[in-house]
Amino acid sequence: MIHALFDDFLTDDRVAALFDAPALVQAMLSMEQALAQAQSEHALVPGPSATAIGQACDVARYDLDDLLQAGRRAGSLAIPLVKMLTAEVAKTDAQAARHVHKGSTSQDVLDTAMAIQSRKAVDLIDARVGELVQLLRDLAHTHAATPVLARTLMQPATVTSFGFKVAQWCLALQRARMALRRQGEQALSVQLGGAVGTLAAMGEHGPAVRQRMAELLGLRDPGGQWHTSRDEWIRLGTEIGVLCGSLGKVATDLALMCQGEIGELAEPTGAGRGGSSAMPHKRNPVSSLVALAAARRAPGQVATLLGCMGQAHERGLGDWQAELAEWPHLLMGAHGALNALVEAFSGLQVDTARMRRNIDALQGLVFAEAATRVLAAVLGQAQAHHLMEQLSKQAVAEGSHLLDTTLAHIAADDALRGQIDPATVKQAFDPEEAAHHPAALTQALLASLPQA
């Protein structure tokens, strides 16, 4: 299908495979198996019956096309799956078939299955964030003192260090990683509430069955049900959305620095990578493209999840189903963006000479702030700022370097000539000196990086 083709373009098989039909149905069956086992341990289901149910919980035994068609008619995949599972168990043990899905409901099956698969997806995302953070950390260390233009409002500003820029990317991603872990621990929970969330069919054993199910499935016991109280679950989705936003920030800066007119960075090359069907010279930043696509889609996906929170009474009508449909795409996009950026930074080409040429090409204008600080020691901040404005305009008009213009003005001004050392002025125009402070900040930022 067309939508699957374009989704596949922006992700990879690992997370996508977690949410395909066989994987999700198997997760649903795993929920049923854990339910039967937990109930058998609390004398709600005979042990042999739980064993028979568990043996039937193999997705290979079921016709998924028939299941999907029946699910459309029923309004839930869980309803026909329970019928198919019951029939499958009955083939070998009619008594055990009476205990299939005992005390549970369809939403328990689907929500728990989504939590099982999301746990795996979040683990994949976490590992990939860790790889990217390490790459960025190493890059920041290497280029802690490498001068590069800082740019504000898309215009040259002053000189910073490339390492300082990278360190800020690094910290944002590590913060997102830690937040995702914390929220994952809260949200990735078993769902077991029965018909209306009260576990009435299991009597006093309900909470213990839920706790044991959580242990068997590697999920958290939430201490209750979350059928229509979706806050923790949706908060997990918003954290993934924030991660996508931070990835988009990295991708934006990377793409801009890869522009031919800037040329400070370049994504890796390879056969067929980043080419153009019409222009042989093109070297397109395809990793940035994938990450930006995820960043652009995530706000709408998160908005859909938030819009689905107002679910009516004890079972949502349409909103829960919309949430289920949207959820996998958010995780797939995040993982796809991470894959793309890990690939980019694994082979990133850093052109430090081009960074320096881009600084030098601006006639020293980006050092006006530093020169103002030198002049302010004699003139005061306001007068020094006004003077540097005038000298900057003069340098632009004459096509001269601001350093030369400034030194000439000082030499011609009796009040300044004896008060300001030309060597101090020259130091204010030195890119290496300008990167010294950002380099120290870079090391401090990396030292403060939250431990994963």
Image (tube, rainbow, N blue to C red):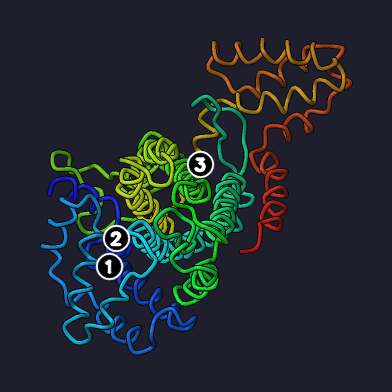
Amino acid under disc 3: Met
Amino acid under disc 2: Phe
Left or right of residue 255, residue 358 in this image:
right
Q: In the structure shown, which secondary structural element does the residue marked by tag 3 occupy?
A: helix
- Residue 261 appears in the picture as rendered: yes
The x, y position of residue 39, in whole percent, is 44, 77
Say which residue label 3 marks: 355
User: In the rendered structure, are the residues bearing label 2 and label 1 in contact, judged by CB atoms less than 8 Å apart?
Assistant: yes
User: In the rendered structure, are the residues bearing label 2 and label 3 in contact, judged by CB atoms less than 8 Å apart?
Assistant: no
Residue visible at 32% across and 58% down in the picture: 106
Disc 1 to disc 3, C-alpha distance: 48 Å
The x, y position of residue 114, in whole percent, is 37, 59
Camera-side residue of 353 and 80: 80
> Crowding near pointer 2: few (<14 within 10 Å), some, many (20+)?
many
The x, y position of residue 88, in whole percent, is 18, 78
Disc 2 to disc 3, C-alpha distance: 44 Å
Left or right of residue 46, residue 350 in this image:
right
Amino acid under disc 1: Ala
Camera-side residue of 109 and 444: 109
Residue visible at 35% across and 62% down in the picture: 109
Q: Which mark is residue 58?
A: none
Q: Is residue 193 above or below residue 148?
A: below
Give whichever of discs 2 and 3 has the lower sequence position. Answer: 2
Camera-side residue of 238 and 104: 104
Say which residue label 2 marks: 19
Left or right of residue 90, residue 157 in this image:
right
Q: Which mark is residue 23?
A: 1
Q: Quadrant of residue 319?
A: top left
Q: Is residue 36 above or below residue 433?
A: below
